């Protein structure tokens, strides 16, 4: 049973809206193997408290496996709370998860990423698909921090593991190296801005990159991170479960694509100060791409994959969609979008994400990583007059491995997304969502008095055939015709809020029997349409 707290949280991230709008069965993370890495809650070197309380009622039916061979393993309240947010039955959206492997953080670093002994081999091959890191820390040695981040980024890029990691809470003073200064992980902050973020300070590993990537509503970065892991797990199922999801496509579960889908779905309306102030600043300094929204990200994923074209002006892609593609140095790919005629106030969110490439240069048993970051750019063009007629926005950071374009107020017209590589051949994930407002007349309330009634029929009758007075063109095809009559008839009696009105006019609606609906008019329309 959902608590009031979980109800409010699920409203905040768009989950309840998704339930209302989606007619099928939603994913629950069923069949997805997941993992948690937890810091030891004990101050004793001989006691290790990092496991969730598996007997908790909200963890019923889940098998929790201890992945760390440490002495005296035990339960921690922090781990239990993270489990509740990640895959628990009351608060998470991935409550269908049944198999969880939990690691103690030090053991994970040393024996799974294989940081020790010195010159050890590469990280262990992961069995899990999504791994949550609700902890922060750093080594005294910069070389150990660098080695750890490279090993994590190697694991993510090589095995397409989805890894949300938490930033430090603002009540602390450190912008820690581990693990939020990774390139390929998803760095998570708090919607209330109570985290330490901004340009990454670690001089040895891509300083100046912007974090967080995304924020979520829980009031601690640990829980916010677990909430992103939960949504990623839910989306991992709908990307890979071909038996239950017609649009399942494993490319949507790749690390780059999942990151782009989550970030493109994030909302900004909660943050009046949100901005990516210059072409070289892809994300807001505090809120990243915005607040986690499972509704938007799910519909982006289910919108399907669309291949980029070699030139602009081709087939228009759907309003919500994504691509997993590859560009070579100097190459561009194009994606054409359209805001339909008579629509307005278009809002477009586009995110391009790619991984830093970590290469093991030692063919033997040792792991000798080097890094290489391609430079990809993102542009949005106005293609209404002609393909690529004018640049509307660019995101061209030379430091980050994400680019983000977010525009509001787009008019009806044609637009083109361009992905280009200025250096390096690289695969990438691209995700977008385009929303726009239909004119009020689609309600059937043609005279805008707040109710669909006989007066609207009169307006339709008096303007039928017109291509200039379109007040009664409810189906937006540019002519007042039979389709607009059909729309009015279907909507008859419904109440609406006209533009500029505070509330709909609550007037008495005539009984349908008292209306005279002239059949002749419909017949004339029929003849008109056949010409």
Image: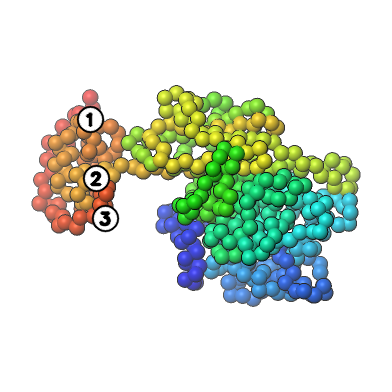
Q: Secondary structure at mark 2?
A: loop
User: Which image quarter: residue 444?
Assistant: top left
Split into 4 quadrants, where in the image is the C terminus? top left
User: Which image quarter: residue 76?
Assistant: bottom right
Look at mark 1 in the image and give the residue it sits on.
468
Q: Residue at x 71, y 46 (%)?
A: 207
Q: How dense is the environment of label 1, judged by Cα within 10 Å: few (below 14), some, or many (20 and up)?
A: few
Horizontal and vertical percent position of residue 279:
57, 37
Horizontal and vertical percent position of residue 381:
49, 31
Does the CB distance between marks 2 and 1 fall below 8 Å? no
Eye-nearest disc, 2 or 1: 1
Sequence-first tag of 3 and 2: 2
Query: For the residues marked 3 and 1, what is the alpha-carbon distance in whole angstroms?
Result: 29 Å
Q: Secondary structure at mark 1?
A: loop
Q: How dense is the environment of label 3, judged by Cα within 10 Å: few (below 14), some, or many (20 and up)?
A: few
**Residue 234 left/right relative to 345:** right
Q: Nearer the viewer, residue 135 or 327?
A: 135
Eye-nearest disc, 3 or 1: 3
**Residue 90 left/right relative to 81:** left
Sequence-first tag of 3 and 1: 1
Q: Residue at x 11, y 48 (%)?
A: 515
Q: Residue at x 61, y 75 (%)?
A: 56
Horizontal and vertical percent position of residue 110:
82, 59
Look at mark 3 in the image and give the residue it sits on.
502
**Residue 512 left/right relative to 4:** left
Look at mark 2 in the image and give the residue it sits on.
444
């Amino acid at each position: 049973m959902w608590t009031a707290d979980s109800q409010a949280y699920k409203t905040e991230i768009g989950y309840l809206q998704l339930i209302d709008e989606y007619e099928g069965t939603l994913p629950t993370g069923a069949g997805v193997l997941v993992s948690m890495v937890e810091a030891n809650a004990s101050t004793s070197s001989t006691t290790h408290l990092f496991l969730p309380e598996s007997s908790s009622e909200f963890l019923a039916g889940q098998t929790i496996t201890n992945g760390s061979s440490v002495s005296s393993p035990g339960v921690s309240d922090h781990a239990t709370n993270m489990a509740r947010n990640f895959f628990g039955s009351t608060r998470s959206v991935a409550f269908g998860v049944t198999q969880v492997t939990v690691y103690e953080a030090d053991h994970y670093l040393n024996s799974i990423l294989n940081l020790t002994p010195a010159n050890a081999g590469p990280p262990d091959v992961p069995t899990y698909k999504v791994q949550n890191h609700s902890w922060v820390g750093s080594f005294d040695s910069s070389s150990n921090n660098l080695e750890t981040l490279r090993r994590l980024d190697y694991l993510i890029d090589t095995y397409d593991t989805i890894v949300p990691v938490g930033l430090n809470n603002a009540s602390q003073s450190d912008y820690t190296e581990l693990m939020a200064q990774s390139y390929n992980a998803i760095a998570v902050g708090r919607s209330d801005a109570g985290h330490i973020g901004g340009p990454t300070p670690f001089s040895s590993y891509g300083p100046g990159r912007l974090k967080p990537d995304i924020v979520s509503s829980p009031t601690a970065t640990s829980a916010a991170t677990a909430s992103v892991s939960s949504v990623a797990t839910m989306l991992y199922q709908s990307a890979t479960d071909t038996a239950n999801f017609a649009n399942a496509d494993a490319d949507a579960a790749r690390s780059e694509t999942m990151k782009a889908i989550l970030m493109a779905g994030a909302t900004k309306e909660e943050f009046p100060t949100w901005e990516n102030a210059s072409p070289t600043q892809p994300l807001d300094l505090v809120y990243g791409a915005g607040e986690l929204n499972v509704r938007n990200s799910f519909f982006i994923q289910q919108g399907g994959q669309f291949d980029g074209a070699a030139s602009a002006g081709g087939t228009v892609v759907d309003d919500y969609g994504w691509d997993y593609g590859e560009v070579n140095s100097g190459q561009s790919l194009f994606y054409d979008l359209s805001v339909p005629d008579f629509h307005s106030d278009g809002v477009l969110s586009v995110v391009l994400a790619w991984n830093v490439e970590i290469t093991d240069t030692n063919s033997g048993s040792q792991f000798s990583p080097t890094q290489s970051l391609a430079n990809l750019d993102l542009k949005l063009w106005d293609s209404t007059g002609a393909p690529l007629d004018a640049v509307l926005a660019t995101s061209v950071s030379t430091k980050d491995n994400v680019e983000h374009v977010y525009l509001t107020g787009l008019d009806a017209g044609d637009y083109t997304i361009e992905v280009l590589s200025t250096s390096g051949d690289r695969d990438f994930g691209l995700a977008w969502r385009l929303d726009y407002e239909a004119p009020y007349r689609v309600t059937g309330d043609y005279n805008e008095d707040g109710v669909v009634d006989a007066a609207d029929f009169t307006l339709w009758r008096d303007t039928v055939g017109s291509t200039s007075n379109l007040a009664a063109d409810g189906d937006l095809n540019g002519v007042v015709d039979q389709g607009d009559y059909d729309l009015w008839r279907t909507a008859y009696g419904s109440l609406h809020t006209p533009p500029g009105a505070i509330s709909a006019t609550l007037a008495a609606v005539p009984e349908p029997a008292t209306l005279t609906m002239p059949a002749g008019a419909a017949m004339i329309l029929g003849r008109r349409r056949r010409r």
